[in-house]
Amino acid sequence: MSFDLNLIAESLPMMLMGIGITFKLLIISGFLGLTLAIFLLLMRISGRWYLSFPAQVYIYVFRGTPILVQIFIIYYGLPQFETVRDSIFWPILREPMGCAILALTLNTGAYVSEILRGGVLGVSKGILEAGSALGMSVRQKFIYLTAPIAARLALPAYSNDVISLLKSTALASTITIADMTGIARTIVADTYAPYEIFISLAIVYMIFTFGIQKLFGVIERYLGRYTQREG
Amino acid sequence: MSTSDAQPLIQMQGVNKFFGSFQALKNINLEVRKGERIVVCGPSGSGKSTMIRCINRLEDHNDGHIIIDGKELTDQVKDINAVRREVGMVFQSFNLFPHMTIVKNLMLAQQLVRKIPKAEARETAMHYLKRVKIPEQAEKYPIALSGGQQQRVAIARALCMKPEIMLFDEPTSALDPEMINEVLEVMVDLAKEGMTMICVTHEMGFARSVADRIIFMDEGEIVEEAAPAQFFDNPKSERTKKFLSQILSH
Ligand SMILES: Nc1ncnc2c1ncn2[C@@H]1O[C@H](COP(=O)(O)OP(=O)(O)OP(=O)(O)O)[C@@H](O)[C@H]1O
Ligand SMILES: [Mg+2]
């Protein structure tokens, strides 16, 4: 079997045209997912069962089912309901892009809220007691003590989730989206050269993963500057 | 102090405290007048921490009354906050905010709770850092300080809130021996200035020279309450004698 370098040279630029879509999926669902995760977290730690229970069910459902299935349910399933077609969300849900972003958001939100909860649980009780003793309110303690300390603790696990999300964006290609993977699949269908194309695609993802890791490394060092004795 | 007829600053009347079915405090009655220095001692698990943590509502009591400067502690958040504004607390494990510089540690609650403007909060912070003799550490993070320095910061942080009362829960027992004195010195200074203090400590030298009264607790009860001379030289209860012989033997 021969490895056609020319083919790679020709198809790489085409695949890279999908970068924009891949990043759009990553950044929009990453941002919305984080927002959702914070809401779910607040519900879970509210201490009120009617908030924490629904959040727990939500997290269980979205962590317990494959994201590909979630994408299919949203893309193929939702339009069957007239209420969905009549709703203000229809312009979004009619588009594959809207469905993919929605699915990725709902999914990553569930995971990230658990990651954040781990951070919150890691904040030492003594620090919060010191806040109470100084007269800080529950809200002030959360904003000024729990949130920043928990964010630092959750960051390594969170960066893993962002990397997962990057790779999950490839699933959007199953509902006709022309992200990098979607373009690669089209090229493979035309050239019958899956080996070259998919390996180059894999390398592109690896490079992005590397970049994300580096970026989070920088953020970790910045947020964690108080954990080092030097400096 | 000659304020014996004034209303006590701290009143605990018939206070009981349960953790589940375990009774940690049994009928605690305690009065502390303004400017008094109280040392609380007793074996591990005797309820010393629980008692002083009830005073600023880090623990809630099940029965009895706790009245601080005329304000009774109830479930009302307003009452709790009013009391916490008057009561400073220093913990065994320092509990500085690890993600903030020293000076920010001292400014945070001033700004949030007392609504002091930033510049003034910083000035107050530096004032108290000078008093605990570490102004040069202001811009460092807590992790860069020694245990003794961290505890002095914790004391300064509490003082920035201008409390009427200071509670100390074994402030020196997590420290290496050579750092104990630097913290005790700060506490002695505070006592000299007339701060009302309740200190849980086993530093008997400190107790003897600073305390107006020593309270000995065992199994959730106040067993003995006496001036230092009386307490050390002529304790009434057998339990006190046994405790003193153990603690003074090394
Ligand atoms: N949150 C809690 N839940 C259950 N039991 C508790 C709790 N806090 C304290 N206790 C129990 O109450 C008793 C008194 O505890 P406390 O911490 O007040 O003792 P202490 O005199 O301060 O002891 P030490 O010298 O070890 O600090 C102990 O038996 C302890 O196990
Ligand atoms: Mg204790």
Image (cartoon, coloured by chain):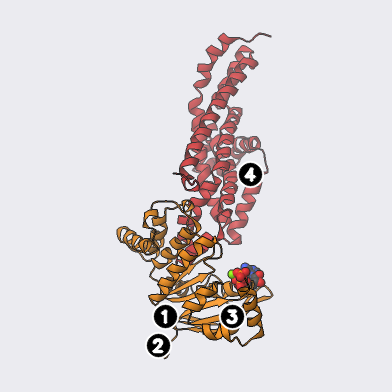
Comes first in the chain, label 2 or label 1: 2
Of all chains, the one bearing label 4 is: A
**Residue B35's mark?**
1
- Mark 3 Cα shell of 10 Å, populated few (<14), some (14-19), many (≥20): many
Inspect the image, locate mark 1, and give the three-letter code of the amino acid beneath it.
Answer: Gly
Mark 2 → mark 1, Cα distance in angstroms:
9 Å
Do callouts 2 and 1 point to residues on the same chain? yes
Badge nearest the viewer, 4 or 3: 3
- Chain for colour red: A
- Mark 1 Cα shell of 10 Å, populated few (<14), some (14-19), many (≥20): many
At 67% across and 41% down in the image, what residue appears? Answer: A65
Query: Which image quarter has ligand 2?
Result: bottom right
Inspect the image, locate mark 2, and give the three-letter code of the amino acid beneath it.
Answer: Thr
Q: Is residue A10 visible?
A: yes
Q: Which residue is mark 4?
A: A62
Q: Which residue is mark 2?
A: B3
Which part of the image, by quadrant, shows the C terminus of chain B?
bottom right
Which part of the image, by quadrant, shows the N terminus of chain B?
bottom left
Do callouts 1 and 4 point to residues on the same chain? no
Of all chains, the one bearing label 1 is: B
Which residue is at the front of the view, B249 or B103? B249
